[in-house]
Image (cartoon, rainbow, N blue to C red):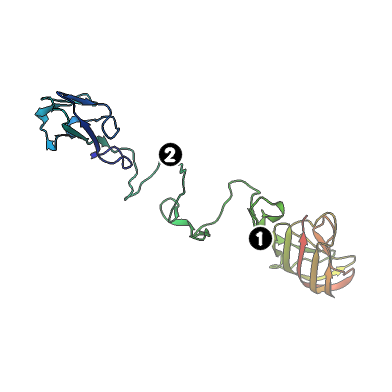
């Protein structure tokens, strides 16, 4: 479908005004406005002489750059030529109805949006007037492993990088009791935030005999290599018939914790909670 005008930025019509010399018939080049006469289709051209609209038989316009009068103008006649250029709109996206860009889009100025549409089924991300970013649904997924978020800073500061969060279960046991763990009490739970690991669980064994130091074993991550000062584990309950109520530390590079029980006979019913660092 044809539309009138070359572009919204240049308007839909161009006006060229000329002041004729004696017996002048051809009008081209720079006009009184300083514009050079140019037109695309002579069907979209109006020519006025001293305010009177000329008919198509009164002039010739065929080459796109000049208009030739059939009858020569008098000196100081005012010739006004109005050109309406014609173009066809193709490969565009409608301002009103929207559409789809198949290629990359580059915006050199500010970009204003009411939201970012994910596959046309939801507005997943919004940025308000205070520059707060809201994720309306779904999760943030990094395309590369070991990436994270710098919190509380405006630059890539290593100490502010949160690049690890994990939660889950792990299989624990009590070593050196000579008994079998009761069903349903094989798993502990953990949460790991950065380098810190938080664990808790309960271990229930049938009757057994402890002949040496009893350890809680099977922590999900090894403790840091350099010191036990970054770890603490609290126990409450019984191990091999012996009451335990204490706080222990995890050995460096270890996934086991001593319970303080080195001997005894009987059942084990122990709950624990602790925290340690992996670096």
**Front-most of residues 45 and 229:** 45
- State the image coordinates of residue 104 (x, y, percent, origin top left): 45, 40
Does residue 179 appear to the left or right of 83 in the view shown? right
- State the image coordinates of residue 13 (x, y, percent, origin top left): 24, 39
Specify which label sits upstream in the sequence, 1 or 2.
Answer: 2
Q: Residues within 10 Å of mark 2 (few under 14, many from 20)?
A: few
- Quadrant position of residue 196: bottom right
Q: Which mark is residue 167?
A: 1
Q: Is residue 170 above or below residue 97?
A: below
Does residue 275 appear to the left or right of 29 in the view shown? right
Q: Residue at x 76, y 60 (%)?
A: 219
- State the image coordinates of residue 137 (x, y, percent, origin top left): 49, 59
What secondary structure is found at the residue carrying circle 2? loop
**Front-most of residues 109 and 95:** 109
| Quadrant of image for the N terminus | top left
Q: Is residue 145 above or below residue 135?
A: above
What secondary structure is found at the residue carrying circle 1? strand
| Quadrant of image for the C terminus | bottom right
- State the image coordinates of residue 144 (x, y, percent, origin top left): 61, 46
Does residue 126 appear to the left or right of 151 in the view shown? left
Q: Are marks 1 and 2 in contact (CB under 8 Å)?
A: no
Q: Is residue 101 above or below residue 179?
A: above
Q: Residues within 10 Å of mark 1 (few under 14, many from 20)?
A: few
The total of numbered circles placed on residues is: 2
Q: Residue at x 24, y 36 (%)?
A: 15
- Quadrant position of residue 91: top left
User: Where is mark 2, residue-wise?
Assistant: 103
Q: Residue at x 22, y 31 (%)?
A: 18
- Quadrant position of residue 83: top left
How far apart are labels 1 and 2 at the CA level?
A: 40 Å
Q: Residue at x 81, y 60 (%)?
A: 256
């Amino acid at each position: 479908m044809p539309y009138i005008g070359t572009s919204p930025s240049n308007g839909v019509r161009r006006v060229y005004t000329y002041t004729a010399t004696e017996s002048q018939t051809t009008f081209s080049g720079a006009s009184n406005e300083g514009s050079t006469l140019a037109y695309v289709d002579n069907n979209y051209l109006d020519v006025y002489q001293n305010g009177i609209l000329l008919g198509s038989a009164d002039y010739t316009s065929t080459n796109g750059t000049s208009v030739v009068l059939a009858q020569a103008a008098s000196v100081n006649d005012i010739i006004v030529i109005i050109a309406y250029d014609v173009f066809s709109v193709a490969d565009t996206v409608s301002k009103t109805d929207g559409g789809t860009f198949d290629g990359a889009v580059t915006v050199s100025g500010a970009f204003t949006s009411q939201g970012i549409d994910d596959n046309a089924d939801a507005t997943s991300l919004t940025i308000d007037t205070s520059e707060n970013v809201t994720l309306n649904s779904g999760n943030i997924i990094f395309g590369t492993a070991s990436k994270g978020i710098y919190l509380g800073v405006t630059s890539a500061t290593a100490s502010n990088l949160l690049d690890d969060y994990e939660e889950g279960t792990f299989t624990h046991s009590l070593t050196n009791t000579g008994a079998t763990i009761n069903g349903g009490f094989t798993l502990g739970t953990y949460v790991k935030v950065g380098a810190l690991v938080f664990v808790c669980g309960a271990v229930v064994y049938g009757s057994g005999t402890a002949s040496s130091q009893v350890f809680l074993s099977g922590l999900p991550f090894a403790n840091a290599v350099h010191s036990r000062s970054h770890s603490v584990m609290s126990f409450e309950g019984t191990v091999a018939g012996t009451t335990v109520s204490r706080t222990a530390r995890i050995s460096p590079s270890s996934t086991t914790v001593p319970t303080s029980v080195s001997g005894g006979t009987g059942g084990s019913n122990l709950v624990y909670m602790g925290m340690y660092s992996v670096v």
